[in-house]
Amino acid sequence: MDKTDAVVLRVVEYSETSLVVTLYTRQFGKLAAIAKGARRPKSPFEGALDLLSVCDVVLIRKPADQLAILTEAKLVRRFRGGENQAWSRSARLARLHGAFYLVELLRRLVEDGQGQENLFELLLATIARIEGRADLLATILYFEVQALKLLGHAPRTQSCVCCGRWRSAGDPALPSALHATEETAQHPGKQRKRLCITSASSVSEAADVFRTTAPNNFLNSKKQITFGLLSIGVLCDTCTPSERNAMLIRPETLALLDRFMQANGPLPDSEIQGAIVELRSLIRRILEGLLGQSLRLGCYVPVALQQ
């Protein structure tokens, strides 16, 4: 038996007495489990298996194609995002929808058995922000950007995702201290190849090199920038025709995306007011490209900051 803490992502009736639940766990990532007897009046699960509840669970893991067996679940915290009386009824409803959107996003974006403790902690922090007074759009957008980053789909903002050049054919390629290799990112039903920066130094150090040595990089552009939605990164003028699904964005939007990736939490409203709507549209289209479809609850995500 394994013990771990988990967030409940889905609950489905299986029989007259049992439930099948989808959990996102700290140690084992996303998994599905059967909770036998969970629908009985006196079950061993103490009412813990509600959507977005945080609970301590004991389970017996099975091979990937079989359901785990949930033997115990103890409620740690129930989601109360719709109960904060400081918000109006419509605002409380919006927070419920926002939280349910996160559940749908995780269920679709994360493979069974795939997970990271950092992503689990991000989910807990995001739930707490939705329950509190944080801006809903900024909170969801921060979660989306950080989840993409943690799952290996971090958008390339510094140099062309295809050839590594900073902006156009006349600009230099990557500094000699760095070299480009081809990395394959796995996703259900899809493979995509990306150009990634590798060297003896870390990726964060490589990003610092771009900021300090590339005055002509995309973040300093004065014109609209082409962003590849399938390759998930900026494109130079030469590589733009090769991308069949792209979006033009303003330099301010790209800079905001870069800041969201580097930040330790949602940015203050005053710093994101101008570009957040376009950035949210960009992230939505990136997710649609990865998943091959729109998220059903995406239409409930706010389109502007709270006033």
Image (cartoon, rainbow, N blue to C red):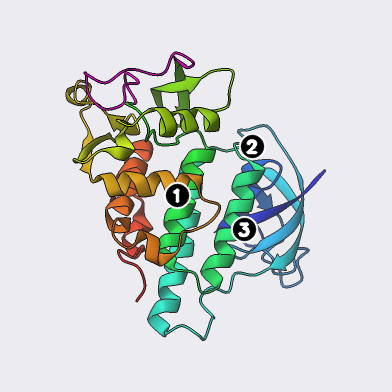
Picture layout, residue 20 above or below residue 114: below
The three-letter code of the residue at mark 3 reads: Leu
Mark 2 sits on what residue?
A: 66
Q: Tag 2: Cα neighbours inside 10 Å, few (<14), some, or many (≥20)?
A: few
Predominant SS of the magenta segment: loop
Closer to the eye: label 1 or 2: 1
Q: Residue at x 53, y 37 (%)?
A: 111
- Residue 178 magenta-drawn? yes
Q: CA distance from mark 3 to mark 2?
A: 27 Å
Q: Is residue 99 above or below residue 68?
A: below
Q: How far across and down, in percent of the image, does residue 23 sit?
A: 62, 51
Residue 124 is tagged as 3
> In the image, which residues are magenta?
161-179
Q: Amino acid at mark 1?
A: Phe
Tell which circle, 1 or 2, labels the residue nearer the N-terminal end. 2
Whether 135 is drawn above or below 290: the answer is below
**Which residue position is annotated with label 1?**
260
In-front residue for pair 76/125: 125
- Please state the horizontal and vertical placement of residue 205, each as a whole percent of the image: 54, 30
Under mark 2, the amino acid is Gln
Q: Is residue 56 left or right of residue 23?
A: right
Q: Nearer the viewer, residue 112 or 237?
A: 237
For mark 3, does the 10 Å Cα neighbourhood hold few (<14), some (14 to 19), or many (20 or more) residues? Answer: some
